[in-house]
Image (cartoon, rainbow, N blue to C red):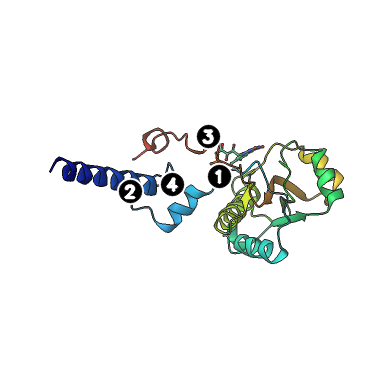
């Protein structure tokens, strides 16, 4: 009788542990998350990359996701330079410490003659916003396809523009290493350190 009760309790405990392990796959994942929320939580800044090239068709899929992003007045002033050649990556390494060994780097810029400019508010223009939305689409699409990315602002804009001989009206915004994450790539603590909504949202 005692043995039967012990077996029942042990079976229950094993079931509880299994359910907890299943639910605990991603520390942030929450029951009821939408597919979009799952993807947004799955993406994290990847700073360790596998030594593996990214097939061009996969890169094109990622770039297509950027192409459907909204831009002010649909002017699409953004430009994306795809760096894959060893000599270009080596050049990039001279202006940023943040390639993290990725086999591909996307350099995002915008054409300052093509961006939207506010007619009544001098200085208000959309280039950085347009590029940022395009880059965000790309980051999320990459994550969905199993690729890792990091948004990098830590580079010398003017030096990069000179090194790659960009036209004077092309302004760089960010660079984005992209590739397959290394096996040991994992989110930094910053990925889950978030202010509560009441610190960032003001209801009126
Ligand atoms: C505008 C911007 C600039 C960033 N610049 C850098 C950078 O230069 N180098 C870097 O390693 N990460 C950079 N990051 C990545 C952030 O540190 C990272 O997104 C943040 O800590 C949250 O972590 P997560 O991306 O893993 O969720 C940048 C992110 C943004 C949005």
Is there any visible trace of residue 165 in the rendered image? Answer: no
Instruction: Mark 1 and mark 2 in contact? Answer it, CB < 8 Å.
Output: no
Q: Which circle's residue, 1 or 3, is located before the other in the chain?
A: 1
Q: Measuring 84% from the left and 44% from the top, which residue is drawn there? A: 90
Q: Which circle's residue, 3 or 4, is located before the other in the chain?
A: 4
Residue under label 1: 44
Q: Secondary structure at mark 3?
A: helix
Which quadrant of the render holds ligand 1? top right
From the top left corner, tell me how far across and down residue 190 is, in percent. Answer: 53, 34
Q: Which circle's residue, 2 or 3, is located before the other in the chain?
A: 2
Q: Which mark is residue 190?
A: 3
Q: Looking at the picture, tell me which residue is in the foreground, 70 or 143.
A: 143
CA–CA distance in space, label 4 to label 2: 10 Å
From the top left corner, tell me how far across and down residue 198 is, in percent. Answer: 36, 35
Where on the picture, by quarter, is residue 56?
bottom right
Mark 2 Cβ inside 8 Å of ligand 1: no
CA–CA distance in space, label 1 to label 3: 9 Å
Q: Is residue 115 left or right of residue 70?
A: right
Residue under label 4: 25
């Amino acid at each position: 009788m005692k043995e039967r009760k012990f077996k029942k309790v042990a079976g229950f405990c094993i079931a509880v542990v299994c359910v907890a392990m299943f639910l605990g796959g991603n520390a942030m994942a929450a029951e009821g998350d939408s597919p979009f929320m799952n993807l947004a939580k799955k993406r994290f800044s990847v700073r360790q990359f596998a030594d593996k090239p990214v097939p061009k068709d996969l890169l094109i899929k990622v770039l297509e996701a950027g192409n459907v992003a909204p831009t002010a007045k649909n002017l699409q002033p953004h430009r994306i330079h795809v760096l894959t050649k060893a000599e270009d990556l080596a050049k990039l390494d001279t202006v940023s410490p943040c390639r993290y060994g990725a086999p591909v780097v996307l350099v995002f810029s915008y054409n300052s003659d093509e961006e939207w400019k506010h007619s009544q508010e001098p200085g208000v223009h959309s280039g950085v916003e347009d590029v940022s939305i395009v880059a965000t689409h790309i980051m999320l699409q990459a994550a969905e396809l199993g690729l890792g990315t990091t948004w990098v602002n830590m580079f010398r804009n003017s030096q990069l523009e000179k090194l790659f001989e960009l036209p004077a009206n092309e302004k760089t915004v960010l660079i984005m290493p992209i590739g397959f994450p290394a096996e040991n790539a994992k989110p930094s603590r910053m990925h889950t350190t978030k202010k509560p909504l009441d610190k960032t949202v003001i209801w009126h």
